[in-house]
Amino acid sequence: MVKVKEIVQKFEAFAPKRIAEPNDPIGLQLGDLEQEVKKMMVTLDVRPDVVKEAIENQVDFIFAHHPAMFVPVKQFDLSVPQNKMYAELIKHNITVYAAHTNLDNANGGMNDWLAQALGLANVSPLLPTRAEKWYKLAVFVPTENSESLRQALAEAGAGQLGEYKSCSYTLSGTGRFMPTEAADPYIGKAAKLAEVAEDKIEIVFPASKKAQVLTAMRAVHPYEEIAYDLYQVEDLGEKTGMGRVGELTTAMTVEKYAKFCKEVLSLQGLRLVARDKQKMVEKVAVLGGSGAKFYPYALRQGADVYVTGDVSYHTAHDMYESGMAVIDPGHHFEAICKPHLKELFTKWNGENNWEIKVLSSKLNTDPFDFI
């Protein structure tokens, strides 16, 4: 039987917590990572009706895009609907986990799904990219211990570059040292200069694996005092960034593109900010959720249209004056994540023999109606 933590571990390899925006309350929201899962449900929001749906379907685990607990609970007053919802989750042993801006930033995640739905090609991040720090370890070891050390470092996660594992470089030479009277040398004798055939092993790894790699080195290395260098290297980590910008395969007017967005996103309506609705659109920027404040990035990248939710009145004025058209489909257009998350977890379900049933919430959690 698979546990929540195993599902989470697989997901966080795809969208690590470290790529989330600062102070975003992602991760375990409520419940137990050790809980066994027979049925899981993916959803955009965790709302009382969604919890009711989960209970009716005997769901053990809810995986949501939007965190259920944005605001800490100070008084667990069950007359408050949100608190009552938490109580129902606890009562029915349902664990809740949220992947918010880490899913937004992930390559192949939320903003790539939106870009695909909106017909964009030649896609790249909208906001500046970030990458995890990487280190290179250069460690000196007796030649006879070289192979066992390389193996230990690889097993700890070092030396993985793309689809290649156990990548390292070895240079042979001579190591020299003189143990003091207080030393307990593996090779050599006190007060006598020793010369040893040694290998210099160089291997790289991401910052997230630093502790386990150094622990593995110390556990296997035979020397009392290990000679090694550790320094940061550039341009090795996977680059991730918020939002996407891309090109339409066929140019169309702002008005026609707005209607296209309404159709493909299955919306009742949307809001359009545009000086000229007949302007031709070739380049489009998109950012899921509330991305109004980032419109200057869309301008800098030469986007003709920016698609994002929750545009405020005064920001819309600024967008209008900038000359860039803006399409606001509402925050709920991120509901596009539900079929994609279901597909992702169903794929992992088969690959890992989890034998769980993956459901997608059928409820529309958009609080707004167009009349």
Image: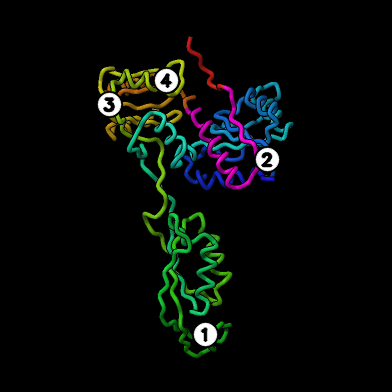
Find residue 25 and report its image quarter: top right
- Give, as a three-letter code, the residue at label 2: Val
Question: Looking at this rendering, what residue extends furthest in the bottom direction?
Answer: 192
Asked if the residue at tag 3 contacts the one at tag 1, i.e. Cβ–Cβ closer than 8 Å, the answer is: no
For disc 1, the marked residue is 179
Q: Earlier in the sequence, mark 4 or mark 2?
A: 2
Residue highlighted by disc 2: 37
Disc 4/disc 2 C-alpha distance (Å): 36 Å
Amino acid type for the residue under numbered disc 1: Pro
Nearer the observer, disc 1 or disc 4?
A: 4
Marks 1 and 4, how far apart at CA: 77 Å
Q: Nearer the viewer, residue 197 or 148?
A: 148
The residue depicted at 44 percent of the width and 34 percent of the height is 113
Which residue is more in the foreground, 100 or 182? Answer: 100
Report the residue marked by disc 3: 251
What SS does tag 2 mark?
Answer: loop
Disc with the residue nearer the chain's start (1 vs 4): 1
Residue 289: give x, y in percent of width and height: 46, 29
Q: Who's the residue at 57% across and 39% down the image?
A: 346
Could you tell me which quadrant the N terminus lies in? top right
Q: Which of the labelled discs sits on residue 87, or is there none?
A: none
What numbered label is drawn on residue 263? 4
Mark 3 and mark 2 lie on one chain; the one further toward the N terminus is: 2
Between the residue at mark 2 and the residue at mark 1, the CA separation in whole angstroms equals: 57 Å
